[in-house]
């Protein structure tokens, strides 16, 4: 599997890969995005419905938790190890990208936020991802805690 764009940028900044390799790997990500845009062009009704469902779901989350927390959660998920949907969240920190763009309600592979519980610097998030069939998506619980710079970081498992 191709590393996420965030992982590629970090490897490049550490000097582990050259600019040519970074560009080649980023081109692979770009081709995936272009293929999805072509699918949307071929089936605009399905693309419109996907957008409506994502806007509706994100609107509910933003009303309950606020856009700042939702964006912080998406950024933390983008940095999560061993989480395949992180490749869709690489630019979640950019405030000019609408939040609903990060959800994939019916398009394979799905990425939905099933629940968020935030209390006292600790945030628990239930994510559904994978198979788009009803009840077939995997559920995963993430627990994040705010660090000294107020960024969400994965909570260390208790020993």
Image: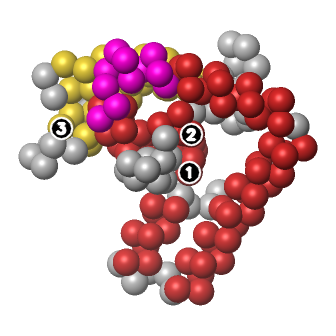
62 or 150: nearer the eye?
62
Q: Secondary structure at mark 2?
A: helix
Q: Which residue is at 56% across, 39% downward?
A: 101
Picture quadrant of residue 9: bottom left
Majority secondary structure in the magenta region: helix
CA separation, marks 3 and 1?
23 Å
Q: Report whether residue 1 is seen.
A: yes
Q: Is residue 104 left or right of residue 86?
A: right
Identity of the residue drawn at 81% across and 30% down: 46
- Label 1 belongs to which residue? 87
Q: Nearer the viewer, residue 136 or 101?
A: 101
Residue 61, magenta (yes or no)? yes
Report the span colored magenta. Answer: 58-68
- Residue highlighted by disc 2: 101
Position of residue 100 relative to residue 2, above or below, is: above
On screen, residue 57 versus residue 92, left or right, reads right
**Which comes before the other along the chain, label 1 or label 2?**
1
Residue 127 x %, y % = 49, 26
Q: Cα distance, mark 1 to mark 2?
A: 13 Å
Name the residue that disc number 3 marks: 146
Q: Which is nearer the N-term, disc 3 or disc 1?
A: 1
Residue 3, labelled with which disc? none
């Amino acid at each position: 599997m191709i590393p996420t764009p965030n992982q590629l940028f970090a490897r490049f900044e550490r000097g582990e890969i050259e600019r040519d390799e970074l560009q080649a790997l980023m081109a692979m990500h770009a081709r995936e995005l272009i293929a999805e845009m072509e699918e949307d062009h071929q089936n605009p009704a399905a693309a419109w419905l996907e957008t409506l469902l994502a806007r509706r779901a994100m609107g509910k989350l933003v009303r309950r938790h606020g856009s700042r927390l939702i964006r912080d959660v998406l950024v933390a998920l983008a940095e999560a190890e061993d989480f395949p949907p992180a490749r869709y969240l690489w630019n979640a920190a950019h405030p000019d990208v609408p939040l609903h763009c990060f959800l994939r309600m019916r398009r394979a592979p799905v990425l939905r936020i099933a629940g968020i519980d935030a209390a006292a610097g600790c945030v628990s998030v239930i994510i559904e991802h994978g198979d788009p069939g009803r009840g077939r998506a995997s559920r995963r619980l993430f627990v994040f805690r705010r660090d000294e710079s107020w960024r969400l970081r994965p909570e260390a498992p208790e020993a």
